[in-house]
């Protein structure tokens, strides 16, 4: 099977056998600025991987694509994915079938990341947990009773739209209030307002580690935004564990976990959930695609074997 993580900055593809062993893999900077270019890029990499494994593209049992946003199966549109220009056009997601010509599914990337945490990471053995990705965008995967919860339209976990942080509710198409203040762009903008020149959120967190007072103020505000968002999540879902992932959630855990946990404790009625940073980044989505796809691929192989078996 083929697992694919389509991100704004990188695309990651892994070809695995039905035991789950990865036999070929590629990570490349994404050409996400252009819809057609990223499709061409995915097709090229898929061809390289199958050649490396000594198989044809048609031999792939199943491809699982993890993308931002929500896949509208009626129109083929990827909704709420502003970081992937062009994917909002009708039929866009269906063209992923051309990457390998094999059966495929399209899943929200953060939902897959939650499955990855449940199968390989901190969520193992935890029946109720959430995976919160904070980076270029913000999203949440929800696991209830050990199963992924998608909601009635697949939009469960779109916490970027929570009214948190005093951000602009009309910050941009597909970009909610919480995301406008707590995503990577929000962190950089907050730093700029305090006179701190930083090209990326990573620069801000590095400055905070070096003792910069303005950067420390930005980090404190970021922790407060996250804690308020998690207070709403905790009140509704009562998770045992919150896993922070994404470029900010996983890489700045040393700066965020303690203040977020402390602030959250003051905002909820009962003891807050445990908060930890993912140890699987940047492979969480890819591993989730493998976890999801292996079960489905094995079922497909079994069904084909049964159909080909003569009876009577």
Image (tube, rainbow, N blue to C red):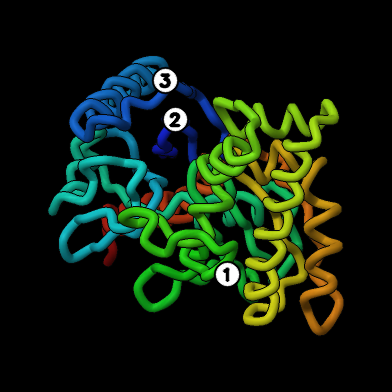
Residue 250: x and y, percent? 69, 42
Per the image, the residue denoted by label 1 is 147
- Earlier in the chain: of badge 2 and badge 1, it is 2
Residue at the far left in the pictured view: 90
x and y percentages locating residue 29 in the rendered image: 42, 22
Using the numbered discs, state the Cα–Cα distance from disc 3 to disc 2 in whole angstroms.
Answer: 26 Å
Q: Earlier in the sequence, mark 1 or mark 3?
A: 3
* Quadrant containing the C terminus in the rendered view: bottom left
Q: Which residue is mark 2?
A: 9
Q: Earlier in the sequence, mark 3 or mark 2?
A: 2
Asked which secondary structure carries label 3, the reply is helix
- In the figure, 47 relative to 244: above or below? above
Residue sitting at x 31%, y 53%: 304
Above or below, comparing residue 84 to residue 114 in the picture:
above
Nearest to the observer: residue 295 or residue 210: 210
On screen, residue 81 above or below 126: above
């Amino acid at each position: 099977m083929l697992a694919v993580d389509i991100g704004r900055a990188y695309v990651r593809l892994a070809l695995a056998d039905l035991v789950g062993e990865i036999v070929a893999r590629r990570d490349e900077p994404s050409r996400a600025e252009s819809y057609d270019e990223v499709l061409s890029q995915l097709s090229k990499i898929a061809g390289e991987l199958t050649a490396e494994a000594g198989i044809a593209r048609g031999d792939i049992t199943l491809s699982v694509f993890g993308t931002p946003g929500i896949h509208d199966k009626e129109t083929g549109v990827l909704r709420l994915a502003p970081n992937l220009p062009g994917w909002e056009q009708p039929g866009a997601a269906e063209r992923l079938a051309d990457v390998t010509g094999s059966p495929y599914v399209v899943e929200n990337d953060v939902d897959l990341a939650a499955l990855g945490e449940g199968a390989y990471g901190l969520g193992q053995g935890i029946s109720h947990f959430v995976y919160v990705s904070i980076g270029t965008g913000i999203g949440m995967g929800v696991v209830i009773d050990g199963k992924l919860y998608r909601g009635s339209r697949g939009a469960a976990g779109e916490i970027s739209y929570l009214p948190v942080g005093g951000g602009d509710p009309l910050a941009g198409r597909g970009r909610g209030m919480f995301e406008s203040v707590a995503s990577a762009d929000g962190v950089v903008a907050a730093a700029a307002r305090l006179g701190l020149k930083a090209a990326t959120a990573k620069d801000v967190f590095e400055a905070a580690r070096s003792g910069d007072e303005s950067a420390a103020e930005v980090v404190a505000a970021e922790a407060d935004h996250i804690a308020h968002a998690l207070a709403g999540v905790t009140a509704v879902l009562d998770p045992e564990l919150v896993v922070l992932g994404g470029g900010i959630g996983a890489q700045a855990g040393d700066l965020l976990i303690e203040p977020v946990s402390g602030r959250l404790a003051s905002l909820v009625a009962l003891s807050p959930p445990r908060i930890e940073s993912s140890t699987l980044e940047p492979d969480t989505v890819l591993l989730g695609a493998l976890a999801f796809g292996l079960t489905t691929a094995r079922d497909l192989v079994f069904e084909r074997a049964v159909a080909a078996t003569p009876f009577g």
